[in-house]
Image: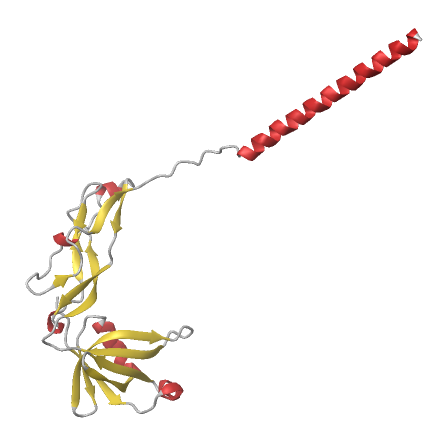
């Protein structure tokens, strides 16, 4: 599916630095436009116009950025900064593209699942493991797609998998920047961890032995002392 061509109105911006706080307070978002061989340009867009466009465009949608009354620049969203506290948009970066040159962008991989759970998954013997959630693709800006569907309805048994080479897309124009054998999703067995075996710590064993030896020494000592006293008593009697 090819993304729709979107349109967004912008104005040239002369307010820079910390003064842009005033713009945000008025519902205006500062933005930058840059591109290969292009001079960077400071612009501003209205927040109420920007939000729906960002939602539709994502990272692959082509936008006609209309700056003032004359300039129209074909751009893609390359970065959005948010306030860490309020979550509001602070700044947007637009990348101007050449419509005749391919660009590289990340595209999400979306699973197409069966109506009923896969049997081995339903029985708790396995799980669906998606190892890649997105992949970088290369194509002309006008031909980019917003997602690639991964149909897992054919997966049945443990170790069944879908690789990059199995994906369905227009290979005549689109290039996926990953190896064909890379696994996208697989049916992985559920591994139940065994209870850990309690093994005595070596130091504890040594301590027990040491205590035993110490006790033995005490008994030997006591026995030795008693034997010495008896001999001394007999010697006194002889005297």
- To which quarter of the image does residue 145 belong? bottom left
Q: Residue at x 17, y 83 (%)?
A: 73
Residue occupying the point 61% across, 32% down: 207
Instruction: Indicate the quadrant where residue 19 lies.
Output: bottom left
Q: Nearer the viewer, residue 162 or 229?
A: 229
- In the picture as drawn, the residue positioned furthest to the left comes out as 172
Residue 15 position in % (x across, y down): 34, 90
Residue at the spot x=11%, y=57% of the render? 168
Left or right: residue 31 compared with residue 171 = right
Q: Give how far across and how far down residue 126 sits, in percent.
A: 27, 42
- Against 39, is 168 above or below? above
- Quarter of the view holding residue 139: bottom left
Name the residue at the top extreme: 238
Image location (x, y in percent) of residue 234 = 87, 9
Quadrant of image for the N terminus: bottom left
Number of on-image labels: 0
Q: Residue furthest front?
A: 239
Q: Is residue 117 visible?
A: no
Q: How is the image coloured?
A: secondary structure
Work out whether 78 lies above or below 134. Answer: below
| Residue 93 relative to residue 170: left or right | right
Q: Position of residue 78 (x, y in %)?
A: 25, 74
**What quarter of the picture does the C terminus occupy?**
top right
Determine if residue 119 is in view. Answer: yes
Q: Is residue 194 left or right of residue 222?
A: left
- Vertical side of 166 occupied by 148: above or below: below
């Amino acid at each position: 599916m090819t993304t729709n061509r979107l349109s967004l109105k912008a104005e040239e911006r002369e307010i820079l630095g910390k003064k842009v706080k005033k713009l945000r307070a008025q519902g205006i978002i500062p933005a930058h436009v840059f591109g290969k061989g292009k001079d960077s340009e400071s612009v501003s867009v209205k927040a109420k116009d920007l939000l729906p466009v960002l939602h539709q465009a994502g990272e692959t949608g082509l936008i006609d950025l209309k700056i003032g009354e004359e300039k129209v620049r074909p751009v893609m969203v390359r970065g959005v900064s948010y306030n860490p506290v309020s979550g509001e948009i602070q700044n947007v970066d637009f990348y101007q593209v050449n419509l005749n040159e391919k660009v590289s962008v990340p595209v999400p991989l979306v699973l197409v699942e069966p109506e009923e759970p896969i049997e081995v998954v339903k029985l708790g013997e396995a799980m669906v493991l998606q190892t890649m959630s997105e992949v970088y693709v290369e194509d002309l800006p006008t031909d980019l797609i917003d997602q690639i569907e991964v149909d897992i309805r054919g997966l049945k048994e443990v170790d069944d998998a879908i690789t990059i080479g199995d994906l369905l897309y227009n290979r005549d124009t689109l290039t996926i920047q990953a190896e064909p054998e890379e696994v996208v999703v697989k049916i992985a067995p559920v591994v139940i961890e065994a209870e850990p075996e309690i093994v005595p710590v070596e130091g504890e064993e040594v301590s027990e032995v040491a205590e035993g030896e110490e006790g033995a020494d005490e008994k030997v000592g006591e026995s030795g002392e008693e034997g010495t006293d008896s001999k001394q008593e007999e010697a006194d009697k002889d005297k």
